[in-house]
Image: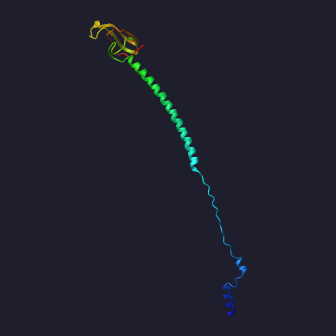
Amino acid sequence: MAFIIGIAVGAAGGGDTSSDDAGAQPAPTVTETETETVTLDPTTAQQAEFDKQSKSLDERESDLDAREKELDKREKSLDKTEASLEKNTIPGDGTYLVGEDIKAGTYISNDNSGCYWARLSGTGGDLGDIIANGNEEGRAIVTIKASDEAFETSGCADWHKK
């Protein structure tokens, strides 16, 4: 029995450690990591994009400046036209003094319905002050002379100097 216990103890002890047993063990793994550093220059790409956008914005700004100048020019022209129309228009109902409120000349009024006008030699309201008058439907044409004192209009569309 001692013999069996001896074999069991010998087997449990690991027995002989020879070089043959060393080859059975796995070799340690060594990993070498080589890191390559690549330097990207983001500022070059960003600068190129910025330059492209900046050029585009400069072109748009230039176009807008040109359009603004053209619109300013057109606005001045319209202002002159409006001033001329206003100066040469008899607006609506009223009695207007020739040479002060309105200029002498030929005036046209369109699309009238129930339009009354009168050239006047005075503003006293006397029947004798009427030089000429008319009741108009549709288009009306009146020549106001520099010698007229006033022009009266009622129910007429605006009168525009010809």
Query: Would you say 87 lies left or right of 23 here?
Result: left
Measuring from the top left, give residue 123's x and y in whole percent: 28, 11
Q: Is residue 1 visible?
A: no
Measuring from the top left, give residue 77's x and y in whole percent: 45, 23
Quadrant (top left, top right, bottom left, bottom right) of the C terminus? top left
Residue depicted at 53% across the width and 37% down the height:
58
Quadrant (top left, top right, bottom left, bottom right) of the N terminus? bottom right
Q: Quadrant of residue 86?
A: top left
Q: Quadrant of residue 99?
A: top left
Residue depicted at 67% across the width and 93% down the height:
2
Q: How is the image coloured?
A: rainbow
Does 119 sit above or below residue 52?
Answer: above
Measuring from the top left, give residue 33's x and y in whole percent: 64, 63
Does 162 sit above or below residue 68?
Answer: above
Does 143 sit above or below residue 64?
Answer: above
Query: Would you say 3 lies left or right of 88 here?
Result: right
Measuring from the top left, give residue 133's x and y in whole percent: 34, 8
Q: Is residue 84 visible?
A: yes
The number of numbered badges drawn on the structure is 0
Q: Residue furthest right?
A: 20
Query: Would you say 68 lies left or right of 125 here?
Result: right
Viewer-proximal residue among 10 and 23: 23
Q: Residue furthest bottom?
A: 2
